[in-house]
Image: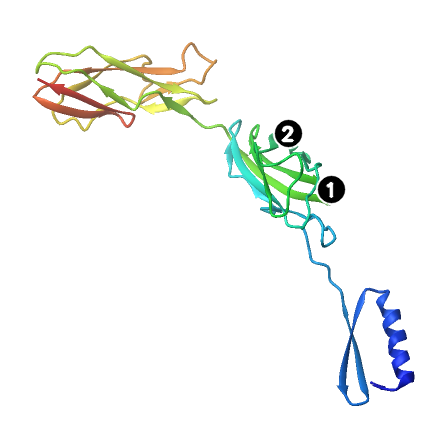
Amino acid sequence: MFDFNARSHHLAKDLARDLAVSSVILLAVLAGPGCLTVTSEDIEPPGATTGAPPGGPQATCVPKDVVFPPTPANHLATSTVVCTNTGTSPTGENLMISITGTGSPVFSAQFMAGTYPASGLAPNQKAQISLSYTPGGVSADQATLMVATNVGNVTIPLLGDGLAPSCQLSIATSELTFPDVTVGASSAPIAFAIENVGQVDCQIKAPIMIGDDSTGSFQVLSTSIQPNGSEYAIPPPGTESTSRLVIQVGFTPTTRGVLTGWVGDFVSLSGTGD
């Protein structure tokens, strides 16, 4: 506490000048007649992901890290990162993205079309980055997405686990519809295929049965692969002469009206008996 006279007044001014060079704010509070209390408080610049000085462009990206779901080998998982100019002026034209680290070959990144203007991001404008992860096998992959701007770099960890390849089946149709048929007569058979589009053998329980057909009007006539005991084994593409199990279904209505059923859990059936 200083006596408020000419000498202490000059002393406070000198103290304020000396402290100002250390980025310290002096708060002078008149505590009472003839008294001056001097306190100080450090200046803290507002935080920004890029560490940019206040008043200019600042890039902030979310989320702060990306964890992909467990993904079978050679399959694709995707995610998105959104970067925003949280400052007060454009970020410029040099916003660039890259992926670094030992796991970088299985990750990729690119700006989504139309989300990043060539003139840079205006304040509060966003750019979206599309990320993909394609593991090559059973693995624990790590890399870093780097977003380089004219005010600093933003780094985002990327994590993903690759799983062993799994069976993948594809069926081109979900329903077989037979034409109207006289009761007791048979329609021309209709076939559909269950195709292995993965990388390992797929097993389907045998025999393939007709379900939910209380009238007994539908029949499985044939299959292109013979069962091996209690299973059909469908090889992956490129390893055998065929990677498809073709099933022929017949329709012989036993009663009038619209009749329905299922081939296993794969395809629904419908037809009308006249």
The N terminus is located in which quarter?
bottom right
Identity of the residue furthest to the right in this view: 7
Image coords of residue 92 (percent x, y): 70, 40
The amino acid sitting under disc 1 is Asn
Image: 21 above or below 174: below
The amino acid sitting under disc 2 is Pro
Image coords of residue 63 (percent x, y): 58, 46
User: Which mark, by number, is residue 78?
Assistant: none
Tell me the element at label 1. loop
Query: Residue at the spot x=7%, y=21% of the render?
Result: 256
Query: Residue at the spot x=80%, y=67% of the render?
Result: 24
Q: Nearer the viewer, residue 87 or 153?
A: 87
Q: Nearer the viewer, residue 263 or 225?
A: 263
Image coords of residue 114 (percent x, y): 57, 33
Tell me the element at label 2. helix
The answer to whether 176 appears left or right of 140 in the picture is left
At label 1, counting other C-alpha atoms closer than 10 Å, the crowd grade (few under 14, some 14-19, many 20 or more) is some
What residue is shown with label 2? Answer: 105
The answer to whether 100 appears left or right of 164 in the picture is right
The answer to whether 248 appears left or right of 146 in the picture is left
The C terminus is located in which quarter?
top left
Q: Quadrant of residue 43?
A: bottom right
Image: 214 above or below 148: above
Image coords of residue 144 (percent x, y): 66, 39
| Residues at circles 2 and 1 in contact by the CB criterion of under 8 Å | no
| CA gap, disc 2 and disc 1 | 26 Å
N-terminal of the pair, mark 2 or mark 1, is 2
Image: 222 above or below 116: above
User: Which mark, by number, is residue 150?
Assistant: 1
